[in-house]
Amino acid sequence: MSIKPLFTATATAIGGRNGHSEAADHTVSVDLSVPKEMGGPGKPGTTTPEHLFACGYAACFGGALDFVASQHKKSAKDAKVICAVTVGPRDAGGFGIAVKMNVEDLSLPQAELESLVHEAHEKICPYSHATRGNVDVAFTIKGA
């Protein structure tokens, strides 16, 4: 599958999970540390790749949801999207991630919000496309 490039974000990481990562345009600059739960030092003021993925997926999905809603003459611009990314060992070896997505918009009826979330996940969000078939993504949806 090919895409028509609209924007490219570039970042460099040095030192892996116990290092530093920064966007080429300097809009994001973070120190990284393995959390204590994974046997690392869990240094204060640091983050993890999972935090960064969760932030990106939540923001991207919120945008996709509002895009889909606008196509149906609705608005989901104030939807709250909470993305929880879990990392752990895989049965097949190595490590994998799982995602739990909580979407709330009390301005939309429950059934309508569920339909919009499904459409955003299946048809629009690039993070959803990238994870499909590779990462378990579970949704909890709360509308009016």
Image (tube, rainbow, N blue to C red):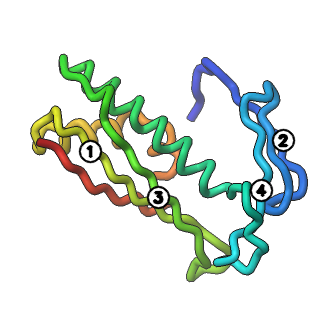
Which secondary structure, mark 4?
Answer: loop
The x and y percentages for residue 62 are 39, 35
The amino acid type of the residue labelled 1 equals Glu
* Badge 3 vs badge 1, beta-carbon distance below 8 Å: no
In the image, residue 53 above or below residue 126: below
In the drawing, does residue 143 fall left or right of residue 62? left
User: How many neighbours does mark 3 have within 10 angstroms: few (below 14), some (14-19), or many (20 or more)?
Assistant: some
Q: Where on the picture, by quarter, is residue 56?
A: top right
Viewer-nearest residue: 19 or 68: 19
Which secondary structure, mark 3?
Answer: strand
In the picture of the structure, the residue carrying the numbered disc 4 is 32
Indicate which label's residue lies in the foreground, 3 or 2.
3
In the drawing, does residue 60 fall left or right of residue 115? right
In the picture of the structure, the residue carrying the numbered disc 2 is 12
In the picture of the structure, the residue carrying the numbered disc 1 is 104
Q: Where on the picture, by quarter, is residue 143?
A: top left
Distance of label 2 from label 1 (alpha carbons): 34 Å
Which secondary structure, mark 2?
Answer: strand
The x and y percentages for residue 47 are 69, 55
Q: Earlier in the sequence, mark 2 or mark 1?
A: 2
